[in-house]
Image (tube, grey):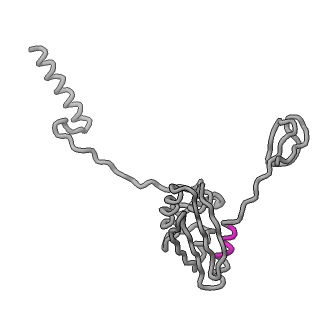
Amino acid sequence: MKKTVLFAFIAAFCAAAAFAAGEAPAAKAEPAKTEVKAAKHDCANCPMHKKMTGKKCAGMGCPEKMKGVETVSKNTENGVEITMTAKDKGTTEKIQKMAPAHYAPGAKKCPGCPTAVEGAETKYENVENGIKVTITGKTPEAVKQIQEASAREHAPKAAAKKYVCPMGCASSDKPGKCPKCGMEMKEQK
């Protein structure tokens, strides 16, 4: 009998504690409600937008700067044509999925992007290994601005020079004397 009373007392204590904590009794538990929030896109590390100090893109992807994507830009009579291709199927699918967010009419554009030029019209289409984007302007001024923006965006980057100590003490991105042994740093080839 003492065990029964003790068991009843413990059960009552647990129920009271659960009620005080705001939990429903175990017999009538309701499923938990979860709130799902959309993740904010922060592409501060996006290669295309790193040069926009203090600014972030408007939440869109940067398919032409993805790893494994080869981008070729060429001027046309009315603007530019940018072709992005990938060697593997997974990367091809990614850039094709990102294209609507980046190139669709009404998508928010980043400053400096050829698609952000006032009066620019952007069309894109999937091709076998990627996408082809055509950016055109209706006026000669718009065409010139689109072509200049594309040239800045897709210009080949010069390889950074590296300087090393002949004794192997240190390396640097600037010429000068080795901070350890004092020998003249030589350009690494």
Q: Nearer the viewer, residue 123 or 91?
A: 91
Query: Residue at point 16% right, 36% down?
Result: 27
Viewport quadrant of the N terminus: top left
The magenta stretch spans which residues?
Answer: 146-152
User: Where does the image place residue 79, in percent across and percent down from the top left?
Assistant: 63, 78
Q: Nearer the viewer, residue 177 or 133?
A: 133
Query: Residue at point 52% right, 66% down?
Result: 128
Q: Quadrant of residue 49?
A: bottom right
User: Where does the image place residue 108, in percent across and percent down from the top left?
Assistant: 52, 68
User: Where does the image place residue 160, in percent across and percent down from the top left?
Assistant: 77, 53
Query: Residue at point 60% right, 59% down?
Result: 69
**Majority SS type along the magenta span:** helix
Answer with left or right where residue 102 lies relative to residue 49. Answer: left
Answer with left or right where residue 110 lies relative to residue 167. Answer: left
- Looking at the image, the residue that sits furthest to the bottom is 139
Q: Nearer the viewer, residue 53 or 93?
A: 93
Vertical placement of residue 123 versus 153, above or below: below
Q: Quadrant of residue 180?
A: top right
User: Where does the image place residue 150, in percent across and percent down from the top left?
Assistant: 65, 71
Vertical placement of residue 67 versus 152, above or below: above
**Count of marks placed on residues:** 0
Query: Residue at point 56% right, 70% down?
Result: 132
